[in-house]
Amino acid sequence: MADYRAPLADMTFALNEVAGMAQIAQLPGYEDATPDMVSAILEEAGKLSGEVLAPLNDTGDRAGVKLTEQHEVPTPAGFKEAYQQFAEGGWGSLQFDPEYGGQGMPKLLATPVMEMWQAANMSWGLCPLLSQGAIEALEANACDAVKQTYIPRLISGEWTGTMNLTEPQAGSDLAAIRSKAEREGDHYRISGQKIFITWGEHDFTDNIVHLVLARLPDAPAGVKGISLFVVPKFLVNEDGSLGERNDVKAVSLEHKMGIHASPTCVMSFGDEGGAIGYLVGEENKGIACMFTMMNNARLGVGLQGVAIADRAYQHAVTYARERVQSPAPGTREAGPIIKHPDVRRMLLTMRSLTEAARALTYVAHAGLDYEHAGSDEQKAAQKARVALLTPIVKGWGTEIAQEVTALGVQVHGGMGFIEETGAAQFQRDARILPIYEGTNGIQAMDLVGRKTLFDQGAAMHNLLAEMRELIVSAEGSAFETEAAALAAGIEAMELVQASLLNGAADDANLAGSIAFNYLMLAGTLCGGWLMLKSALAAAAKADAGDSDPFYQAKQATARFYFQQILPRYLGYAAICAEGSDAVMALDEALF
């Protein structure tokens, strides 16, 4: 398997030239994020990801995980030691509040660092990703006592966190959950079963902090009657030491298509009288509290799409340079397959989609920093924009990961179908991404519903206006043609949105019928917007005399995106224009 090398040049470019790291570093509290500090952090994270985590990716995939009779999950060789190195290095503390032991760095800086963990070893990387979400949910919603007990140890990596939502009968319908919570003094007794719990049991740490949705006996029906509880694997004494084992355990592990080294658990709460839990937020307000974690996770899953796409691209490029086969056009002798036009088409498709998705994901995370530390005006504007971009980042970012990892297999030809080459693992691992943390169908419905119909398209209008400002700035540049193509795409998006806003009230099936293609249309345009921004920035560097070939490559990749990827918007827009008729025409009995 090819080595993983963090794409530091493109990460740094996306941070500085696209997402605006310099502006983020001027916000109150982020002054330590100097260029030298950012560079040093990325360099060191690159070493850990490439030298420690990446070599465990293949071995962990082959070894998998098993549940012992004692309900424990020993992790694959090297995984625990890698986690200890991660925790000792303070890598889980970058973006968190210094009050709880965090480093107080921008979330934007933590984004490429997290990308490295996911690209190097996605099974392993899921553990800190879930802990990050648990920290944010507790920080935003828990009482001071719960915060002081759990957040510092989660930030330090001494403990890890999980998210327990799904139940066998409920799936994505959280209104149908049956887990129960009974009041008992200053705590609650939790009982029930949860499925698909990522890293629900492991040997990395002495304690695991579960965030669990459950329903009180007198709770209202539906999602309005769900509460959120923190349920530790081991109870915590007043002095912070660990007490007795709580009534929670993993009862089985799922056998999955991919992410084999990540234990996906069925968790049982209360088999012996009830697991002790502590309320997070208010009773019956659990969904709002959990959405803090879920929105974080959705952006994180979009970032995973970027990460696994980049890993597959690197792997495919290495193979294409080494694999010698038949003569390319214009040559007489066999040579590396990278010389063949169709292989180059596949590689550039992989590269351009990955770079566009990376830029979009970083821009969304920058918005979170403005939400946290910006002016009141910035906070309001960025809150709306991050809400709009979240389903696009998650949905489009994970859909392009399917395409890129599949192309990675294809570049390898028949060898891609053989597990030993490693290309297949990336495709298997990537397949979960459009499913968990809300399927991409749910993301699409969120985009057309809460993020378009609810505000009558205001947030999307503002985003498209920002794109138009960039188009104006491109007049007279070497990318004027590309800017015009983006303008045409914006016009198509506006027509689709107007049709949706005008027709949704009269056609109950319209939003659901066009939602996925609406999301893909939005993602493709956002990719074009940021690839244009990248190309203009790269051209300016080159025109100023910087001879780094990176800037030439960035411009060439952007041109490929505009010629080979952006035109997809025509198909998405045309499908949206057809409405719901064809989708709903076939009688259920005829399927």
Image (spheres, rainbow, N blue to C red):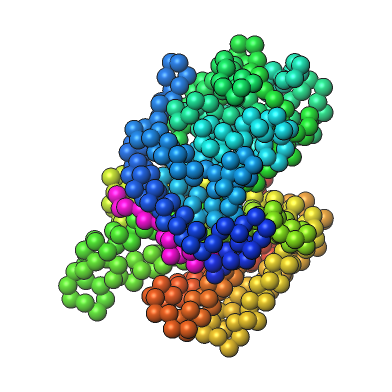
Q: In this view, does 432 lie above or below 342?
A: above
**Image quadrant in which you'd find residue 364:** bottom right
Residue 483 in the image: x percent, y percent? 59, 79
Any part of residue 238 in sight: yes
Q: How many labels does the image show?
A: 0
Residues 446 and 217: in front is: 217
Q: In this view, does 543 lie above or below 65?
A: below
Residue 396 in the image: x percent, y percent? 57, 56
**Stretch in magenta:** 1-15
Identify the residue at image location x=71%, y=41%: 140
Residue 12 within the segment the image draws in magenta: yes
Residue 83 in the image: x percent, y percent? 43, 37
Q: Is residue 441 left or right of residue 507?
A: left
Residue 45 within the segment the image draws in magenta: no
Locate the C terminus by quadrant: top right
Residues 320 and 151: in front is: 151
Identify the residue at image location x=45%, y=47%: 117
Any part of residue 436 in sight: no
Q: Is residue 356 left or right of residue 236?
A: left
